[in-house]
Amino acid sequence: MTNDSETVLDKTGWALLGALQEDARSSYAELGRRVGLTAPAVADRIRRLEVAGIIMGYHAAVNPTKLGLGLTAIIRFFSPRESYARIYAVIEACPEIIECHRVTGDDCMTLRAVVSSVEHLQELITRLAPYGTSNTSIVLSSPLHHRVIGLAALMREKGRIAEDAEAGSPPESGPGAPAAPGAPAARGQKKGRELIAGHRAHSGPVRLRN
């Protein structure tokens, strides 16, 4: 996190951010009751979250099925010849595509589209076909559709980093001290070199069999 984010995301800031993600239409008074602040303090906190770029906007969550677009598809798209600017222009011209992510791996990007039927999906894929190849999956269900981004995810990552740092620290000195990861392998390699050196001293060069 940046310094600006750290100044506004204390325990209360995280609680307020979670409450807003759950229901952004909550009043300042209701939010204040949830996080233990007055309504003016909540308003000031939200303003600071917006200025810091943490809150980027407020949107309505729409059910596409109720709009006649009951089929959701994930499209992996690859174009070996077209420029990204050209591909983006094509995607912009397809209103059914509601998300576009440029990704690593064999594909150029991953798209999410909502359509009314399999025939509608086929027509969309046909529109994309002149510009590259696609691999399409139809979404059957979405057990996890929208999860609140909270402190728990960040703390889990910090905990993992701390565990990795501890695992990679040098071993304690003295008898009985626990060995660091990789130490047994290193000692085994050293012992092997000592054995080979001793063998050479007594019986000449070591010959390895293919």
Image: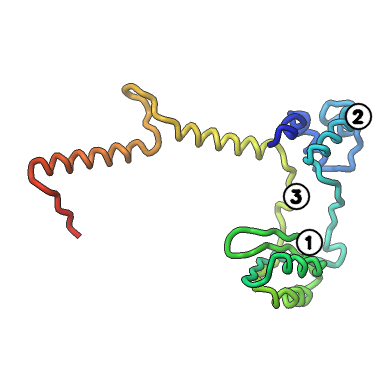
Q: Is residue 139 visible?
A: no
Q: Which residue is mark 1?
A: 98
Question: How many discs mark residues in the rendered view?
Answer: 3
Taking the image as shown, residue 170 lies to the left or right of residue 199, namely right
Q: Residue 28's quadrant in the figure?
A: top right
Who comes first in sequence, dot 2 or dot 3?
2
Q: Nearer the observer, disc 1 or disc 3?
A: 1
Task: Name the residue at 36% across, 25% down.
Answer: 177
C-alpha separation, residue under disc 2 versus residue under disc 1: 35 Å
Helix or strand or loop: what does disc 3 sit on?
loop
Please name whichever residue, 118 or 172, is drawn nearer the observer in this view of the structure.
172
Cα separation, mark 1 vs mark 3, equals 15 Å
* Residue wearing tag 2: 39
Identify whether 125 is placed above or below 31. below
User: From the viewer's perspective, is residue 43 above or below residue 204?
Assistant: above
Residue 95 spot, x, y in % from top left: 82, 67
Q: Is residue 180 visible?
A: yes
Give the percent coordinates (x, y) of residue 201.
Answer: 10, 40
CA neighbours of label 1 inside 10 A, class few (<14), some (14 to 19), many (20+): few
Dot 3 amino acid type: His
Q: Secondary structure at mark 2?
A: helix
Secondary structure of the residue carrying tag 1 is: strand
Q: Which one is in front in this view, the residue at disc 2 or the one at disc 3? A: 2
Q: Residues within 10 Å of mark 2 (few under 14, many from 20)?
A: some
Amino acid tagged 1:
Ile
Q: Which residue is mark 3?
A: 146
